[in-house]
């Protein structure tokens, strides 16, 4: 992944929920708060996809979210990385029989790192992101 | 000059855990109408539930929402028990209440932090979330997980709280209470928060009743509605606590209700832990068969009444599960609270009902109809934060 060397110092992440239960999402926010403090690795949560280097995707991808997820991914500047967080993003989990579920995420956009768990603990999310940073360049 | 603007908010924003869509129609600075568009997070849970057994269904409804992830199981189990006529053991009742109230604590603190973030008080966000962590540690000690506790099952609870664990839990609770007390005092005495939130987004008592608001949203408008008192289940009829209400109905009243409710929750947990020491026995009854019929179950979730309806045909799977989440009834109240307010206040008013993005879903959109200008949630947040800055400047308080 040679072309990603530029991202090694400070990764800006964007969080996108495609139909999850909120838990992965609050655990992502938890990573930013004083106990876990993801910012010490230079990782910052940003509000706009155009500023982001990495998207953190949670949820099983609902029919209504799918076009918006693709659009968001297309709007992201290169080089782009995707991290799937939680069982739903990885395999659609407990929601797989649902008629409105078109996931998992990697069926529609390439995913570079997977963090399993329902929900993954903040430690696991940090571990996943740090491993991704370590694998760059 | 008469210019109408529609501002879109959402669907993907770092703080909106779940996508939801609001359209604010504005005239200059003033909001004149709001439209809510939901369905981004529809995961067909009610349909999936029809292919699960009654035991499996609890795990499914737990995943309706991660923040109130014990409310739906409690309501669901209440419904199954109502259907089958099961009376759960007393010990299970206390454990259910302990988990339910711990959840209220963590949820209210989570909301207080997010509210701080919405009005540009990131210090409050970081501060409150730091003190929320000990509550999650208590959860880990009681249930084995930080979220998705998997404690409920039809007929009782899955795990016991050992007597040896009670002193450590009480100690953790005492420490958490001190921190919450400090945050509460600091937040309620803060002149900027008062200036920013008092008199904003008022929902009158009549409107709260007309819109069938539930939970803290209704209680902040002086309606003392609470399923735990009105129709006691679990251990809520066996312990001493009171309903917190406020009369003003503005955003500040909602903050007061939520923060003061934290102390009532701590009171309930303490009493339940005491009772656990003397109440011996099973933590669950064996459920052999679910007869054909209908059952309903309520639970007062942190956001209001969660309602579950179950119909069974006598097999081991439900024929129909219907869920009504509190946000679904609270969300329409923004039709009266948001219009007439400034755009800068819209975010915090919308956030004040504590919309559960997963239980319902949301996204707001604001478009300038005349000029075709599109506003985003970030612009709204910026406006909201600027207003706090202005108030601080006027009061002579320097930036944090």
Image: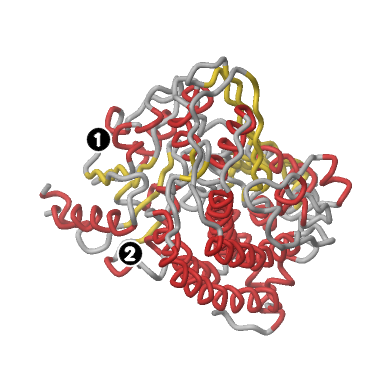
Task: Say above or below: A11 vs B37.
Answer: below
- Find residue B316 and report its horizontal and vertical position in percent: 47, 20
Q: Which mark is residue A77?
A: none
Secondary structure under tag 2 reads helix
Residue B265 is drawn in which quadrant?
bottom right
Q: Mark 2 belongs to which subunit?
A: A
Q: From this viewpoint, is residue A1 visible?
A: yes
Q: In this view, does B396 lie to the left or right of B113?
A: right
Residue closer to the observer: B373 or B31: B31
Residue closer to the observer: B3 or B151: B151
Q: Residue at x 71, y 54 (%)?
A: B216
Q: In this view, does B128 lie to the left or right of A61?
A: right
Secondary structure under tag 1 reads loop
Please rate how many residues cluster around mark 2, counting C-alpha atoms within 10 Å: few if below 14, some from 14 to 19, many from 20: many
Query: Quadrant where the C terminus of chain B lies?
Result: bottom right
Q: Which of marks 2 and 1 is in front?
A: 2
- Name the colouring of the figure: secondary structure
Residue closer to the observer: A73 or B165: B165
Residue A63 is drawn in which quadrant?
top left
- Same-subunit check for callouts 2 and 1: yes
Contact between labelled residues 1 and 2, with CB atoms less than 8 Å apart: no
Q: From this viewpoint, is residue B385 visible?
A: no
Q: Which residue is drawn at 50% across and 31% down?
A: B287
Residue closer to the observer: B4 or A1: A1
Which residue has dot 1 on it? A110
Q: Mark 1 belongs to which subunit?
A: A
Q: Which mark is residue A38?
A: 2
Task: Say above or below: B20 vs B195.
Answer: above
Cα distance between the residues tagged 2 and 1: 24 Å
């Amino acid at each position: 992944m040679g072309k990603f060397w530029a991202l090694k110092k400070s990764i800006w992440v964007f969080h996108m929920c495609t139909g999850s239960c909120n838990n992965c999402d609050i655990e992502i926010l938890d990573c930013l708060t004083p106990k876990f403090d993801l910012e010490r690795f230079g990782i910052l949560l940003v509000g706009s996809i155009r500023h982001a280097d990495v998207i953190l995707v949670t949820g099983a991808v609902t029919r209504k979210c799918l076009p918006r997820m693709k659009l968001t991914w297309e709007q992201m500047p290169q080089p782009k990385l995707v991290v799937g967080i939680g069982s739903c993003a990885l395999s659609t989990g407990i929601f797989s029989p649902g008629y409105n579920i078109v996931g998992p995420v990697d069926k529609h956009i390439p995913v570079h790192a997977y963090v399993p768990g329902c929900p993954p603990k903040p430690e696991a999310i940090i571990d996943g992101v740090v491993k991704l940073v370590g694998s760059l360049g | 000059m008469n210019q109408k603007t529609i501002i879109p908010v959402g669907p993907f924003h770092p703080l909106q855990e779940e996508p939801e869509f609001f359209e604010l129609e504005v005239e200059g600075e003033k909001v004149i109408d709001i439209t809510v568009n939901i369905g981004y997070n529809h995961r067909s849970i009610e349909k999936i539930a029809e292919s699960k057994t009654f035991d499996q269904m609890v795990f499914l409804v737990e995943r309706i929402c991660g923040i109130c992830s014990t409310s739906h199981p409690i309501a669901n189990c209440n419904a199954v028990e109502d259907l089958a006529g099961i009376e759960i053991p007393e010990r299970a009742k206390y454990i259910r209440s302990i988990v339910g109230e711990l959840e209220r604590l963590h949820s209210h603190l989570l909301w207080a932090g997010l509210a701080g973030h919405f009005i540009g008080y990131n210090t409050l966000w970081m501060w409150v979330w730091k003190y929320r962590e000990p509550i999650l540690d208590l959860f880990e000690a009681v249930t084995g997980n930080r979220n998705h506790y998997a404690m409920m099952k039809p007929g009782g609870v899955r795990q016991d709280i050992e007597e040896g664990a009670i002193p450590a839990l009480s100690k953790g609770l005492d420490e958490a209470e001190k921190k919450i007390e400090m945050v509460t005092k600091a937040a309620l005495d803060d002149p900027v928060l008062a200036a920013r939130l008092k008199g904003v987004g008022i929902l009158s008592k009549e409107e709260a009743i007309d819109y069938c608001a539930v939970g803290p949203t209704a209680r902040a408008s002086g309606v003392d509605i609470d399923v735990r008192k009105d129709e006691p289940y679990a251990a809520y009829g066996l312990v001493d606590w009171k309903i917190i209400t406020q009369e003003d109905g503005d955003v500040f009243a909602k903050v007061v209700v939520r923060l003061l409710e934290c102390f009532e929750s701590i009171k309930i947990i303490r009493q339940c832990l005491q009772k656990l020491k003397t109440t011996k026995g099973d933590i669950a009854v064996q459920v052999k068969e679910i007869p054909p019929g209908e059952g309903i179950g309520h639970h007062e979730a942190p956001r209001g009444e969660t309602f579950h309806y179950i119909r069974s045909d006598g097999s081991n799977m439900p024929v129909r599960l219907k869920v009504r989440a509190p946000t679904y009834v609270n969300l329409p109240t923004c039709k009266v609270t948001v219009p007439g307010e400034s755009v800068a206040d819209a975010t915090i008013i919308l956030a004040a009902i504590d919309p559960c993005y997963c239980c319902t879903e949301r996204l707001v959109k604001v478009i300038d109809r005349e000029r075709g200008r599109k506003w985003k949630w970030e612009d709204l947040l910026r406006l909201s934060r600027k207003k706090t800055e202005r108030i601080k400047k006027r009061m002579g308080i320097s930036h944090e």
